[in-house]
Image (cartoon, rainbow, N blue to C red):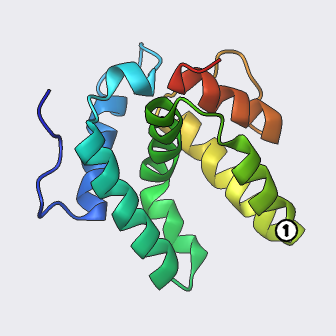
Amino acid sequence: MTDLFNSNTTLPEMEDILALYCLHDTEHMIHAAEDIPLTKNDFNQMLGYLKSFVNWLGDASAYRDVKLTIIVAWIFAEKFSKKDLSKVFLKSVAQLPQHHYRFYMDLLASAIVEFNLDTYSENYDDIYGLINIIHKQAGIL
């Protein structure tokens, strides 16, 4: 399998490339780990960019521009590690003020809907439903 990204691919370009895999067929629910041919190299590059973006950015509203990349990174982190990373997520969001928690939940839920990711009949507005979707998307549940 060849890499989706080259060394010069920017984070917004990654978002656009990933979106092509999700928006090509609105009749078909997307199974990210199966439908997006992301390599480990792609994942590592994307993760590095996201970490830099998160550390550099002071305004979380810009996350809307890379919300698909964020959710795909979580899915592939679980796929490649074969681990349930939800405890890390739960620990992180438990410390947030309620309005920040709601922002991140809404961001991830909107990515699921907008990019036609299969919900497996889980409630994407509920934190445990969202976690179950991520697990199922990654193929670990």
Q: Look at 71% across and 52% down and name the residue there.
A: 88
Name the quadrant containing residue 98: bottom right
43 to the left or right of 91: left
136 to the left or right of 18: right
Image quarter where the C terminus lies is top right
Q: Secondary structure at mark 1?
A: loop
Residue 21 or residue 4, whichever sits in front? 4
Relative to 84, say whether 110 is above or below.
below
Residue 38 or residue 19, whichever sits in front? 38
Q: Look at 42% across and 50% down and name the residue there.
A: 69
Image quarter where the N terminus lies is top left
* Residue 45 image point, x, y percent: 28, 56
Relative to 69, say whether 58 is above or below.
below
* Residue 82 image point, x, y percent: 53, 29
Name the quadrant containing residue 95: bottom right
* Residue 121 image point, x, y percent: 71, 16
Residue bearing mark 1: 95
82 to the left or right of 130: left
Relative to 95, say whether 86 is above or below.
above
Q: Residues within 10 Å of mark 1 (few under 14, many from 20)?
A: few
Name the quadrant containing residue 50: bottom left
Residue 118 in view? no
**Amino acid found under the numbered disc labelled 1:** Gln
Q: Look at 80% across and 57% down and name the residue there.
A: 91
Give the total number of marks visible in the rendering: 1
Residue 65 in view? yes
